[in-house]
Image (tube, rainbow, N blue to C red):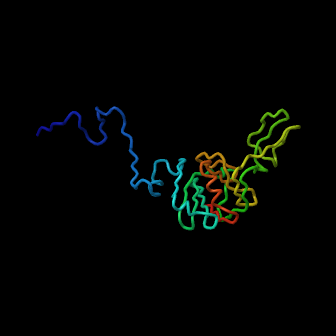
């Protein structure tokens, strides 16, 4: 029996002569836009810079009912109103040499502006030239006539007396700090306004 094969057909894996470039998988979000399931299912989550806000819950969130949960593996933080999610936003926690310790904490101190690190910062020489941009004041020498300048930490929210806190800072999408929780600049003022000394903070691996 004679079997005729179409010249442009083939078995599984056969090249398609009419195809100009490889096909790319199309990301399809299965959830309805606007809800939190859709937000988490978006391409690039959790390592993108997207921010989720539930406007109704956020408006009802205040110092009396707020808490914060920080997820080290996702590099995300969650502002909660009791058991309801108000915001999901990106953070950068401690890098491998200075890991942010998991555990249960609370906000111990709030300083909106003027706070600088007593431990980490930059060292300048007597001429004002930068000589160390990642200095540890406990061990790195300051040249004669030079000075140590602690890193700025606006919207400081201390959670431990060992120097760990939440604050505004550079938030690459990977652990990058000396142990603090750097909070995205677009959202840090909102977080600051919703917490008080005593607000619970939970950090999970």
Q: Nearer the viewer, residue 131 or 168?
A: 168
Q: Nearer the viewer, residue 154 or 60?
A: 60
**Horizontal and vertical percent for residue 201?**
64, 63
**Horizontal and vertical percent for residue 31?**
40, 55
**Left-right relation of 18 to 189:** left
User: How many tags in the picture?
Assistant: 0
**Left-right relation of 41 to 3:** right
Tell me which corner region of the image, top left, top right, bottom left or bottom right, holds residue 140: top right
**Left-right relation of 197 to 73:** right
Reply above or below: 27 against 165: above
**Horizontal and vertical percent for residue 150?**
77, 46
Tell me which corner region of the image, top left, top right, bottom left or bottom right, holds residue 70: bottom right
- For the N terminus, which image quadrant? top left
Q: Nearer the viewer, residue 180 or 199?
A: 199
Residue at image position (49%, 47%) is 44
**Horizontal and vertical percent for residue 35?**
45, 57
């Amino acid at each position: 029996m004679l079997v005729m094969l179409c010249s442009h057909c083939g078995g599984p894996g056969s090249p398609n002569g009419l195809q100009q470039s490889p096909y790319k998988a199309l990301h399809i979000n299965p959830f309805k836009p606007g809800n939190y399931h859709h937000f988490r299912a978006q391409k690039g989550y959790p390592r993108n810079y997207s921010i989720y806000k539930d406007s109704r819950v956020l408006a009802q969130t205040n110092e009396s009912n707020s808490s914060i949960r920080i997820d080290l593996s996702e590099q995300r933080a969650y502002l909660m109103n009791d058991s309801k999610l108000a915001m999901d936003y990106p953070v950068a926690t401690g890098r491998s040499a200075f890991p942010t310790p998991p555990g249960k904490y609370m906000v111990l101190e709030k300083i909106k502006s003027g706070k600088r690190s007593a431990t980490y910062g930059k060292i300048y020489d007597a001429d004002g030239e930068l000589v160390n941009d990642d200095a540890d004041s406990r061990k790195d020498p300051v040249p004669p006539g030079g000075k140590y300048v602690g890193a700025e930490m606006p919207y400081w929210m201390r959670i431990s007396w060992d120097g760990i806190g939440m604050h505004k800072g550079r938030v690459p999408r990977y652990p990058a700090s000396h142990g603090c929780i750097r909070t995205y600049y677009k959202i840090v003022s909102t977080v600051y306004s919703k917490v008080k000394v005593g607000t619970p903070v939970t950090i999970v691996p």
